Amino acid sequence: MDEDRTSRNEEQEEPATKPEWRVDTEASRARLEDATADGADGGKLVYTDEDGHQRRLPADMSELGAGETAAAARALSYELGAPEPSYAQIAAIERLNEMHAAGTVSDENFQREKRRLLGLG
């Protein structure tokens, strides 16, 4: 990457809410360029958690708790300039509301699908 190019985060305004975790781009870049790094102590991306500690997530994400997985996903999305991970869920709920208002979804199906999308059962 050219040094004179600015990152996406420098070009755009900062969103109102920053994630608790951040991707440490310099440490991650060094780790990616290190040919001797075998990944035994974690993945290539380096995160800084809410306490300021550097962390590398395991390749097998099933070992992580839901909070750690969500924090890492938010940090990576933020660094890439992607929308919040919940954006698709919100868009689906809005579309469901539109379909219900248009009469293409019954009240029963609307309630069931809305509960599913909100993770309530």
Image (tube, rainbow, N blue to C red):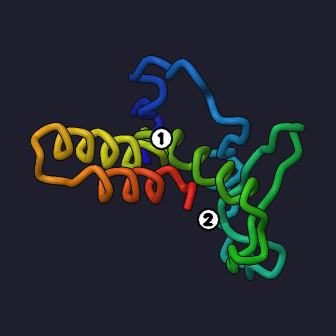
Indicate whether 48 appears above or below 31: above
Q: Is residue 4 visible?
A: no
> What residue appears at the point 17 percent right and 46 percent down from the top-left corner?
99
Q: Which residue bears the numbered disc 1?
A: 84
Q: Looking at the image, which is closer to me, 30 or 106?
A: 106
Q: Quadrant of residue 63?
A: bottom right
Relative to 97, 30 lies left or right:
right
Residue 81 in the image: state x and y as whole percent.
43, 38
Give the mark nearest the N terminus, 1 or 2: 2
Mark 2 residue type: Glu
> What residue appears at the point 48 percent right and 29 percent down from the top-left corner?
9
Indicate whether 9 appears above or below 52: above
Relative to 12, 23 lies left or right:
right
Dot 1 falls on a residue whose secondary structure is loop
Please rate how many residues cluster around mark 1, counting C-alpha atoms within 10 Å: few if below 14, some from 14 to 19, many from 20.
some
Dot 2 falls on a residue whose secondary structure is helix
Q: Looking at the image, which is closer to me, 60 or 32?
A: 60
* Numbered badge on residue 54: none
Which-is-in-front pick, marks 1 and 2?
1
Residue 10 in the image: state x and y as whole percent.
47, 24
> What residue appears at the point 66 percent right and 60 percent down from the top-left corner?
45
> What residue appears at the point 30 percent right and 59 percent down from the top-left corner?
109
Q: Looking at the image, which is closer to me, 95 or 32?
A: 95
Indicate whether 29 appears above or below 33: above
Q: CA distance from mark 1 to mark 2?
A: 28 Å
Relative to 50, 117 lies left or right:
left
Q: Which residue bears the numbered disc 2?
A: 33
Image quadrant holding the C terminus, namely bottom right
